[in-house]
Amino acid sequence: MSTDPRSTHRGYTIIELMVAMTIGLVILAGLVTVFANNSRARAEIERFNQQTDNGRYAVRLLADDLHHAGYLAELNPIGLPLAAAVTAKPDPCATDAVSLTNDALIPIQGYDVNNGVAAPTCVSAPTVTDLKPGTDILVVRRASSCVAGAAGCDPVVAGAAYLQASTCSTDIQAGNSYKIDTNTANLTLQKPVVGACAASAPLRQ
């Protein structure tokens, strides 16, 4: 008995193919949607983590600066008078030797910019283009913990401001506990060596 070949070798009809393609496209669309959502979620998490890390770094940097505020190397500023009478808030943008010397004993200074206090010119627009409007400003004054020119420290740079604090009794008694100048030739304070003031005191930015 022979078998009709049309009944054993049937293919897919066009309707079956269209249904299969539709189901496949729906599944593919679902997978693409899930993948896109996962990618967006991952990008948001990465941005959040980066912002958190940046915030932690900024807070740590600020905390370190505040911790070292008023550090003047060998100089103990307690009881020292300001170099000149303070009649107005010191200008943190000033770089002359007189201003730097006078303001060194004021370790922290704030600007409540959010309540209308004018920001210093050197940290306001257009000098600083990325300054966020209304951002309060904190000025921290301190000397470097590294001795200029020492191993592992920056060399002495011409024109840069340096602090020199004396531990020599003759300097201190003469009222020369410290000097700040941009000309290192003017920094002539000494430190004791074997009981005598015979060496130049170190310089710190």
Image: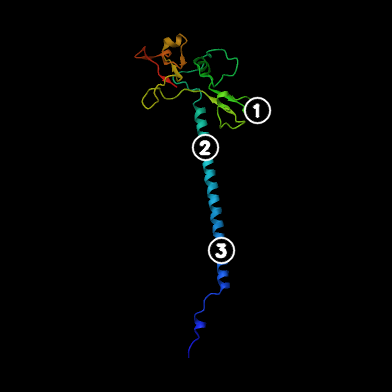
| Image position of 191 with respect to 141: above or below | above
At horizontal 55% and vertical 71% (from top left) the residue drawn is 17
Question: What distance separates the C-alpha of mark 1 from that of mark 2?
Answer: 26 Å
Q: Read off the residue under disc 3.
A: 25
Callout 2 secondary element: helix
Q: Is residue 108 left or right of residue 181?
A: right
Q: Earlier in the sequence, mark 1 or mark 3?
A: 3
Mark 2 to mark 3 CA distance (whole Å): 46 Å
**78 with respect to 201 (left or right):** right
Which residue bears the numbered disc 2? 56
Q: Is residue 193 left or right of residue 175?
A: left
Q: Earlier in the sequence, mark 1 or mark 2?
A: 2
Near mark 1 (Cα within 10 A), the count class, few <14, some 14-19 or many ≥20, is few
Q: Which residue is mark 1?
A: 115
User: Tag 2: residue type?
Assistant: Arg
Q: Nearer the viewer, mark 2 or mark 3?
A: 3
Q: Residue at x 50, y 28 (%)?
A: 65
Residue 200 in the figure: left or right of residue 8: left
Give the amino acid type for the residue marked by disc 3 in the picture: Leu
Q: Position of residue 7 (x, y in %)?
A: 52, 83
Q: Secondary structure at mark 1?
A: helix
* Residue at the (52%, 16%) spot, across then down: 99
How crowded is the residue under tag 3: few (<14 C-alpha within 10 Å), some, or many (20+)? few
Badge 3 marks a residue whose secondary structure is helix
* Residue depth check, mark 1 versus mark 3: number of the one nearer the observer: 3
Q: What amino acid is found at the position of numbered circle 1 in the picture? A: Asn
Residue 152 x, y percent position in the rendering: 37, 27
Q: Are marks 1 and 2 in contact (CB under 8 Å)?
A: no
114 relative to 45, above or below: above
- Looking at the rendered image, the quarter that the C terminus falls into is top left
